[in-house]
Amino acid sequence: MDAIATQTLEPSVVDASRHTPEQLAPRAVKVEDTGLSDLLIADLIIKHLYEGGVLDLLQLSEHLALAGSLLETLLAFLRQEGHVEVRGRSPDSAVLRYALTDRGRASAAEAMVRDGYIGPAPVPLDDYIRIVEAQSVKHCIVTREQVHAAFADTVIQASLLDQLGPALHSGKAMFIYGAAGTGKSFISRRLSRLLGNSILIPHAIAVNNNVIQYFDPSYHHPVKQAVAPGSVRLNQGHDPRYTLCERPVVITGGELTLDMLELQFDGVTRRYRAPLQLLANNGMMVIDDLGRQRVAPIDLFNRWIVPLEEKQDFLALQSGQHIAVPFDVALAFSTNLNPLELADEAFLRRIGYKIRFETLDSGQYTAIWQQLCQARGIDYDANRLKFLLNELYLKEKRPLLPCHPRDLIDLAQDFGRYHGQSGISTEALQWAWESYFVKLTEDGISAHHE
């Protein structure tokens, strides 16, 4: 078995909040500045030409996110080796155009077999580790004032916020539990607001001559940046192999399997994709509906022991080589099951914070109802809400949950639109109630489920 890489993940610590993106990731001027081998960049050039046909220097520069002057050096070498030829300039441009020769096409096909990645040039793993450390969530300062301000528009107990805030500030994992519908998932998502400033996300990471596709638009959302008139993007700002993004929030639920936490390799395209926890670096990851996955909770927990304790993870390439990568993630487990049925006390001790979400009292329920009425453009009627609380909830002894007002109002509006009515009537609320909750009878289950 191959030995696990002994690379330490302790580069010189740089606080990203004190440095601009240009300082953290300056532009590569020469090939050696990229940290990549000549072969890797040359392979990328011919793969782009193989896919795109005839491309000029500006187009190649855009596709590879590398300076044109840097590429010219390698294009001259590829021309000398007979892989690339110069085509005539286009009528509307003075920039040279390039295309593959027959020999170049054969070399590109071989390069695709070695590694199928086609996209912007990657950044070396060492550079990625340095950037992650510089942008670490542990540098994010979370204060009580910030937490309460971030949730000022949310009905939530102050005492609960004062548990969540220190947990996020600490960087330790959180175990959030409570009855279904108490707002665990909603609040977990919104915690990411507190992680602050934008970060640099690489398009891809190079491990030797293997490329791992990293940037994923599902989780990495670019920050809009103003471009000065007449500026040349590839000559100004930070290294374009990185994109300035909001801090990622990766949420996965019942669909999670153990293989989703490993490097994904497609044998057909010969491409690697980063696992979920790697995509979440410098941000937040929420394991929702814990206990509902197709994998046993104990197996899932065991997968997190090393990352949680050592703040690094180990991934395996197809060759068997293991690589050490940062685990810089605010991790939250969320479940409506009994935590002691999912994990033993030994593992739960490794999770710094256990936070229970409770049901609402009538005042909190009323506040949410009023917020939703205002958002939906509905006149708030205290008598209608009194009917709901005293005649329906109290009679059936149902708990007050944060998700109920939204769902019941939506159903009542559906009823009203169907009958050509405006607002929410008592009749509509009664109908919404009967349509929303499961009711057990002697004949079995009747009505719709919650």
Image (spheres, rainbow, N blue to C red):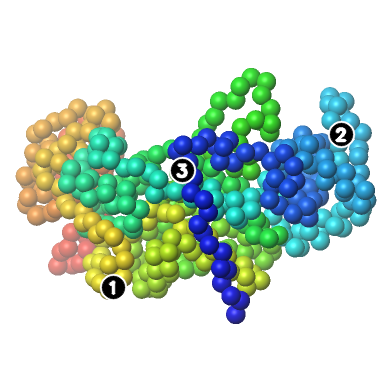
Q: Is residue 274 above or below residue 3?
A: above
Foreground disc of the pair 1, 3: 3
Residue at point 48%, 41% (across, down): 16
Q: Which residue is rendered at x = 10% and y = 54% of the image?
A: 396
Q: Secondary structure at mark 1?
A: helix
Looking at the image, residue 167 lies above or below residue 68: below
CB under 8 Å between discs 1 and 3: no
Quadrant location of the C terminus in the rendered image? bottom left
Residue at which label 2 appears: 96
Look at discs 3 and 2 and give the one toward the viewer.
3
Residue 343 picture location, percent across and down: 29, 71
Tell me how far mark 3 sits from mark 2, CA to CA.
Answer: 42 Å
Left or right relative to 3: residue 99 = right
Considering the image in quadrants, where does the N terminus appear?
bottom right
Instruction: Point out residue 133 in the picture as x, y percentages from the top left corner.
Output: 49, 50
Q: Residue furthest top?
A: 229
Task: Check disc 2 and report its element: helix, strand or loop.
Answer: loop
Please say if 15 is above or below 91.
below
Horizontal side of 217 relative to 191 (left or right) equals right
Q: Quadrant of residue 98?
A: top right
| Residue designated by label 1 | 346
Which amino acid type is shown beneath numbered disc 3? Asp
Marked residue nearer the N-terminal end (1 or 3):
3
Mark 3 or mark 2, earlier in chain:
3
Query: Mark 1 is on which residue type?
Result: Ala
Kindly report which numbered mark, 1 or 2, lies closer to the viewer in this rendering. 1
Q: Residue furthest bottom?
A: 1
The residue shown at (65%, 30%) is 236
In the rendered image, which residue does mark 3 sit on?
Answer: 15
